Amino acid sequence: MPSIPVTKRAVENLHVSASQFKSIRMKILLANLPSKYNRFMSDLKEGLKKCAEVVWDFEEFWKCENEYDVVHIHWPEYLSYEIQSYTLKTEPIPEELWKRTRDCLEYWKLHSTIIYTRHVQYPHRRHDEEFLNYYRLVTSYCHTVVHFADYSVQQFQEFYPEHTHIHHSVIPHHNYASLPNPSTQAEARKKLNIRPEHNVMLVFGDIKENEKEIIEKAFSYVPGDKKILLAPKWAVLRRKISFFDMPHPLSQSNV
């Protein structure tokens, strides 16, 4: 396992009495843009607040001023609005932005522990070498990468074989318990007309076209023949209908 840097804040925390120790709270920076529709970050912050001081502010990452025990990165393209804007373009990320990113990562690696949670392989909107390399840069400074599946560890190591210093950890994806849930399982199945013996696979959130094949493959591994896939935002491409003139019914009358 790689060594974890000892921060100034951690050293200061050593010089406290046993009675004071329980009151010490880790300070965590969530370096990510606000997410309006995805509750992952807000749920994570609420969960961590029970045992740590949590700041969710992407601008803090770029200031390189205040002290944090952990800097937690999620989607590298969401480190700033400027970087996000390049996921909607085809042009290269400016060298000045690469340098600023590198300088900030250098700072935080010296003053904190950088953790990256790997949600995706690369941005949904831009799959090219430019952002694969941007992900490579960001992850190269991380001490730990958190994954939601063993396959993600394998894929990460194939993408970035040079990142041998990183500690990998696999955890379950959280369950969005903050969403309203007024029904029991039996009540929900009755309302949706799903029989008790059916296995149900539920897919949350928006579904991109390139994700459909993965979902179908995962569904094929659900055991048994009695199974149902619930994917409310699975967009179905409909055929375009050509309109043509029809003679008015009265025009065909013999009156």
Image: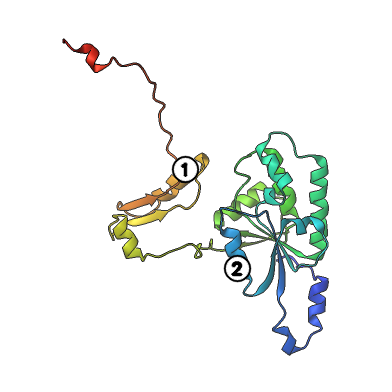
Amino acid type, callout 2: Glu
Element assignment for label 1: helix
Which mark is drawn over residue 46? Answer: 2
Q: Is residue 19 above or below residue 246?
A: below
Query: Farthest residue in the top direction?
Result: 254
In the image: residue 252, left or right of residue 203: left
Q: Please provide percent x and percent y for residue 244.
A: 36, 17
Disc tally is: 2
Residue drawn at the location 24% of the way across and 12% of the way down: 251
Q: Quadrant of the C terminus?
A: top left
Q: Please provide percent x and percent y for residue 145.
A: 66, 59
Q: Quadrant of the N terminus?
A: bottom right
Residue drawn at the location 82% of the way across and 83% of the way down: 15
In the image: residue 104, left or right of residue 128: right
In the image: residue 58, left or right of residue 66: left
Looking at the image, can residue 62 be seen? yes
Instruction: Name the image quarter holding residue 114.
Output: bottom right
Element assignment for label 2: helix
Q: Please provide percent x and percent y for residue 94.
A: 79, 39
Instruction: Name the image quarter holding residue 10.
Output: bottom right
Question: Mark 1 or 2 closer to N-term?
Answer: 2
Q: Residues within 10 Å of mark 1 (few under 14, many from 20)?
A: few
Query: Farthest residue in the left direction?
Result: 255
* Of the pair 24 and 59, the residue shown nearer to us: 59
Distance, label 1 to label 2, CA atoms, is: 31 Å
